[in-house]
Image (tube, rainbow, N blue to C red):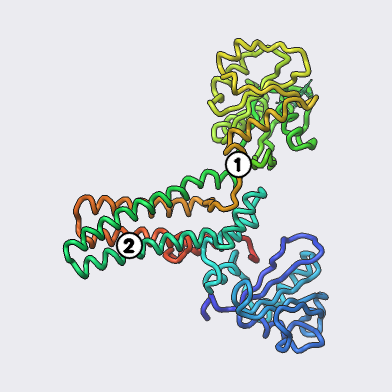
Amino acid sequence: MNKSLDTIAAISTPIGNGGIGIVRISGDNALNILDKIFKTNKNVFEIKSHTINYGHIKDDDQIIDEVLVSIMLAPKTYTCENIVEINCHGGIKSLNLVLDTVLKYGARLAEPGEFTKRAFLNGRIDLSQAEAVIDIINSKTELSHKIALKQLDGNLSSKIGELRDKVILMIATIEASIDYPEHDMEELNLKEVRSKSLELIKEIDLLIDGESKGKILKEGLETVILGRPNVGKSSLLNVILKEERAIVTDVEGTTRDILQEYVSIKGIPLKLIDTAGIRHTNDIVEKIGVEKSKKIAENSDLVLIILDNSKDLIEDDIDLLKKYNKDDSIIILNKIDLESKLDEATLLKYVDKEQIIRISTKEFLGLEDLYNKIKQMFFNGDLNISDEIIISKARHKESLINAKNSLENVIKTIDDGFTEDFISIDLQDSYKYLGEITGETLEEDIIDKIFSEFCLGK
Ligand SMILES: Nc1nc2c(ncn2[C@@H]2O[C@H](COP(=O)(O)OP(=O)(O)OP(=O)(O)O)[C@@H](O)[C@H]2O)c(=O)[nH]1
Ligand SMILES: [Mg+2]
C-alpha cells in the first residue's frame, strides 16, 4: 500500500490528565474503522459531515470509553482526507486504549507531523504554511504567534509566488531572444532582464533584512542580566516579571544556575536570563554557574550589567565591564534607594554616560527608564508587523540568499557578454531556490526532515 495513502491515527492532544483528549484518524478508511468501533444509534456512513456525534468506543462487546466523535469528510478537512476525531476522556489510559483499538481495526500510527504533511501533499497548504503550523504551536511570544498565523494564511507564499512569476517572465523574455535572435530585440531584452533582476534583488534583500527582526520576534531578544553576586540581578528579574520567580537573599552566590523567562517589555519580547553572580570562587557548584553565565553572556542579543550603587566598584565589577560591556550593553546602577558610594568618574572610564540607567528594584525606581532604553535600542519599540512579511526561518533565509546570488549571476553573465542560454540557467536557478521556500522544488528527504520535527498527532 502506498504509505502516503493509508489511514493514519494518533493522539493529537498532549499526554497527561485533561478534560478531554483527542484521537485523530485520517484517510480513506477512517469511516470503516469507526464503523467497527463506534457504538451509536446512527449509521456511521450516513452521518452528515462536520458534525459531532455521541456514543461509545468498543472493542467487540467491551466498552472502552464514552466519547463524542467529529466526522469530517474530504475534501474540506485539515488533511483533505476523511477525518474522524474521537473526543475521549483526557487521561493517558483512555486515550491509549482508544488509540490501540483504532490501530487494531486497521489504522497505522501516524508519524510526527504526518497529518500536516498530508495537507501539504494533497495541495491544501504549501511548505511555508506547514512550517507556520509548527511555529504557531511553538510560539513563545504574542508577536511570533501573529507572524506564524500570517504565514499560515499564506502571506509569505503569495510573496514568493509573486517573485517567481517575475522570474518566469524574465525567462520568457530571454527564451524569446533565443528563439528570435534579431539583434535589436536581443539588446532590448537583455537590458530589461538586467534591470528587472536588480529590482528583484532589492525585493529579496528586504525580506532577508527582516530576518533578524523575525528571529527576535520569534525567540525573544535574548537578554542576560550580568553582575557580581548580590548586586540585585534576581531582584531585577523578579520586578520585571512582577513575581517572585527567583530566590533573592543577601547571601552572595544565591543564584547558581541560569533561569530564563519570557516577558514583553513595551512590546519587545524578551527572553530574560538571570545568572549566577560572576566572581572567583572555589565552590564547585557556583563555579559551574559562573562559567554558564559567562558563556551565555557571550552569545546574547543584549547584556544588562548590574552594579551596586551603594558600594564602590571592586575588581570583579571592573573585570566584568572590561569583558562584557559592548556599545549596546546597558549599565544598571541598582540600589539607588541607598546612599551612593559608587565613584562615577571611575565608572566612566569603562562605559559611556548614555549607557547608564539608575534603578532601585526595592523601591521600584527607574524601571520605566530601563524599559524605554530597551525599547529605543530595538526598532524603537516599533514592532508593528501589520503589513510586513517577516522571515523567521533560517531555511527561508538561505533559499532567499541563493535566489539572490543567482540573480546577481544573471547580471554578471549579461555584463560579461555570455549568451542567453547561460542567463536562462541562472534565472532558472533563482526560480528553483524561491520554490524551495514553498516546497515546490525541494528534495523529498528535506521535506521529510522538516515534518519529522513536528509533534506527534499534528
Ligand atoms: N536596598 C536595596 N536592596 C536591594 C535592591 N535590590 C536588591 N536588593 C537586595 O540585595 C540583596 C541581593 O539581591 P539578589 O537579587 O539576590 O542579588 P543577585 O545579584 O541575584 O545575587 P546572586 O544571586 O548572589 O548573584 C538582597 O538582599 C536584596 O533584597 C535595591 O534596589 N535596594
Ligand atoms: Mg541571584
Circle 1: residue type: Asp
Quadrant of residue 244 in the image? top right
Q: Identify the disc placed on residue 170.
A: 2
Report the side of 168 relative to 72 (left or right).
left
231 sits to left or right of 165: right
Does the CB distance between marks 2 and 1 fall below 8 Å? no
Amino acid type of the residue that numbered disc 2 sits on in the rendered structure: Met
Residue 422 location, x and y as percent?
24, 59
Tell me the distance, in whole angstroms, between the alpha carbons under discs 2 and 1: 37 Å
Is disc 2 surrounded by few (<14), some (14 to 19) or many (20+) residues within 10 Å? many
Residue 171: give x, y in percent of width and height. 31, 64
Helix, strand or loop at label 1? It is loop
**What percent of the width, then of the height, locates residue 22?**
73, 69
Q: Measuring 77% from the left and 85% from the top, which residue is drawn there?
A: 60
Callout 2: CB less than 8 Å from ligand 2 = no
Lower position in the chain sequence, tag 2 or tag 1? 2
How many neighbours does mark 1 have within 10 angstroms: few (below 14), some (14-19), or many (20 or more)?
A: few
Q: Is the CB–ligand 1 distance for label 1 below 8 Å? A: no
Ligand 1 resides in the quarter of the picture at top right
Give the residue pinned by disc 1: 382
- Depicted 209 relative to depicted 374: above or below: below
